[in-house]
Amino acid sequence: MTNIFDAILTVIVGTVTGVGKAVSTAVSTLQDFFLVKIGGMSFVILGARQTGKTTLIEWLRHNMHTLDGFEPDPTAAGGDIVPDFTAKVGETYMKLKPHRDVGGEYAMWEADWMELFRAAQPRGILFMMDHTEPHLQKDALNFVLQMIEDEPAAARNLKAFYILVNKSDLWTDEHTLDEIMSNYRNEQKRLKSQSERMRYKWHVGEGSLETGRGVADVMSRFFNAIRPRPAE
Ligand SMILES: Nc1nc2c(ncn2[C@@H]2O[C@H](COP(=O)(O)OP(=O)(O)OP(=O)(O)O)[C@@H](O)[C@H]2O)c(=O)[nH]1
Ligand SMILES: [Mg+2]
């Protein structure tokens, strides 16, 4: 088994006002400030195979610029190492430490996802989906909901569960988001009742990492939902 701490995305986050174009200076000032004032938080990116987890990390790494010619291979068991990077989401600068990017094949759920969840005790779960294979994605979503249920210690920091239905460039002409999500009615009911009981926010958003459409909006909302409130 790989060291599960390698699979955590740790984020240090904050808002900078009055920042001009000197992003690198701003980011280092911000890190000094927020490392002391706020500390870190963690979120995990889960989702069935080939839904865009690796692409999302790459897109954040490129400060949310659309990616040309990025053609990832499926992420293998144990994951891939990703170097640290900084990214800006909305007005929020982040230092991300994505030690490892985990894969979405069924065999990895029980092993990699479960241990990742226990070790990360994440503030946020970003669950990636697309318009294909509803049976498989339903299983993946139920697996995560059950994991939250079964692992209260790991779920205790959870503030937000966001679903991102990716690849809208491929489905938006034929389907609405509601049509796609109608395959997941029971799961959404389950998510709603669990979120009320455990007091986390949930949201379903859509976007395309291919064109960049919609994703920045979902990510800003997500980071806002999991951001620790600075001490008064
Ligand atoms: N058309 C389109 N393709 C996308 C989009 N986002 C990702 N892809 C493609 O979808 C495929 C899977 O993307 P990955 O990022 O590897 O998905 P993953 O979730 O990391 O996959 P696993 O590691 O196998 O679990 C790749 O060929 C991507 O180029 C999108 O918004 N639109
Ligand atoms: Mg991957």
Image: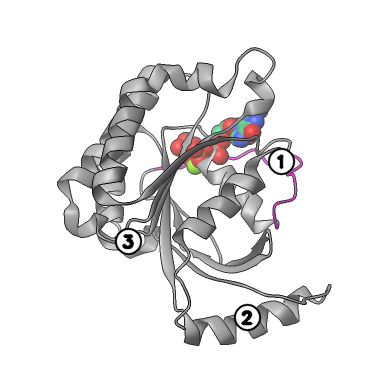
Vertical side of 174 occupied by 143: above or below? below
Residue contact between numbered discs 2 and 3, judged by CB atoms under 8 Å: no
Tell me the tag on residue 30: 2
Bounds of the magenta segment: 63-76
**x then y, percent, for residue 213:** 71, 37
Label 1 amino acid?
Gly
Viewer-proximal residue among 62 and 147: 147
Residue that numbered label 3 is attached to: 120
Q: Which residue is mark 1?
A: 212
Position of 36 relative to 49 (above/below)? below
SS of the residue under disc 2: helix
Q: What's under tag 3, amino acid-wise?
A: Ala
For the point 41% across and 63% down, which residue is it?
42
The verdict on label 3 being within 8 Å of ligand 2 is no
Can see residue 227? yes
Q: Residues within 10 Å of mark 1 (few under 14, many from 20)?
A: some
Q: Residue at x 44, y 73 (%)?
A: 40
Going from N to C along the chain, the mark reached first, 2 or 3, is 2
Query: Could you say whether the residue bearing mark 3 is in a helix, strand or loop?
Result: helix
Q: Which secondary structure type mostly characterizes the magenta part of the structure?
A: loop
Residue at the right extreme of this rendering: 21
Q: Quadrant of residue 77?
A: top left
If you read the primary sequence from the N terminus, does the residue marked by circle 1 or circle 3 appear first?
Answer: 3
Image position of 203 (left or right of 19): left
Residue 33 placement: quadrant: bottom right
Please state if 95 lies on the left or on the right of 37 as rendered: right
